[in-house]
Amino acid sequence: MALIGTFLNVLQGPNLWNVLPDLMVFIAPIWIAVVFGVLVGWAWRPRWANSAIKNLTIPSKNYSSIDFVSSIPTFDSLKSQLPGYFFLFSGTVSPEIDSSEPSSILFSDTSSSKLDGDIKNFVGEDDLKHLSKLVHEKDGGPAWIAMMDKSTSTMSYQAWRRDPKIGPPQYRSRSVYEDMSPEMMRDFFWDDEFRLKWDDMLLEAETIEECPNNGTMVVKWVRKFPFFCSDREYIIGRRIWECDNGYYCVTKGVHYPSVPRRTKPRRVDLYYSSWLIRAVESRKGDGQMSACEVLLFHHEDMGIPWEIAKLGVRQGMWGAVKNIDRGLRKYQKHMASGAPLSHCANMAHINSKVSTNRMIYLENTSNDLQEIETCEHTASDEKPSGNSIPKLLVVGGAIALACTIDKGLLTKAVIFGVARRFAKIGRKL
């Protein structure tokens, strides 16, 4: 009623020219809010809307059809800031999968190109050293903060988080699986073919190169994200070292120019997920080393604000962990049935053996955390810079909403609070 009354007072002016300036002042905030709403609505459009737009055609004498998508901004930078599902610890929260988009997975055969271990050493001893330092908490990073301690009848799980000065949040977890061997667990994590059966976010897994001498692999993953985020593409280098019947497994994002960067899916450059697998005593109390311990270290930058990502991890972590355990038990039964190993699982059997003395030497060498963080955050020439959500757009839209929707103090406080929160998140990117 207050807005209507103000509008009637403006219309009661003596003539049109006196009324026009006041009328423009009255209407301008409304149109700003409308434009802002259209921008956000376009960025948040559902997948079916994308398909409908792509199918639209306009007949013409000079051309057969026009793709409307090519003429409309995609606002990929805005979409990347919206909250989505997060995957963590080599498994993932399982979003609802669109049945209209069948999952597919690609595998290389024995004719795939081979890595020259001396020239293309994507994953080397420096990575082993860094993982060993993480395991023994000698990497010089900040202290770990406990997040979770839960268990089921078949496994127990603990998780920690820390926020380094540079880069996204880092996560550490300790999982102990009953009645499981380290070799089975190693093959399970490496088996991309079977991963499709339990990892609902995996769309493609392709082996690009591999080294038959030390087992190093370069693989490409494409992961499914919700409709308001583009899918993510990973170029991952991975390798396994064996020491004292334990397996140090390193997987990380690598720069691979031979695979061109595409607009969609969006490339994730900063990715690190590595773990130590070893046999431990069962909690049954029988003194048998029949359980398997996995110490995992994970961080990545998916282009989602880190504060939102941390909230998503807290909410979805336990569900992701249980999903991994379910997948692992299926894999255990699958192998017990006499099924042959996949090519990727066979590659997990090719690993480099490291002596205990060598591992001790690596652990006690100079701290390399800052060096690795600096390398990980070196921006690629193709990587866009700047904030993904322009602060002016968010704050301006919030001001327009506050001025037009309601004159109450509570509404304005909520709107400006949200804008301030997003502005702070934007500065961290």
Image (cartoon, helix red, strand yellow):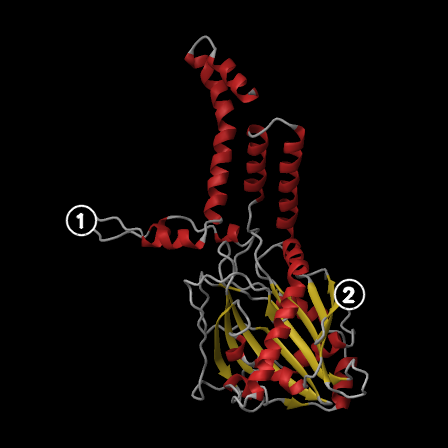
Q: Is residue 42 above or below residue 204?
A: above
Q: Residue furthest left?
A: 61
**Residue located at (26% from left, 52% from top):** 65
Nearer to me, 318 or 261: 318
The image position of residue 12, as x and y in percent, is: 48, 11
Q: Is residue 373 above or below residue 41?
A: below
**Residue located at (80% from left, 86% from top):** 286
**At numbered mark 1, what does the secondary structure look like: helix, strand or loop?**
loop
Nearer to me, 377 or 289: 289
**In the rendered view of the protein, which quadrant contains the N terminus?**
top right
**Number of the label disc, if any, that sits on residue 61:** 1
The image position of residue 246, as x and y in percent, is: 71, 86
**In the rendered view of the protein, which quadrant contains the C terminus?**
bottom right
Q: Is residue 411 above or below residue 313?
A: above
Q: Quadrant of residue 126?
A: bottom right
Identity, as a three-letter code, of the amino acid under mark 1:
Lys
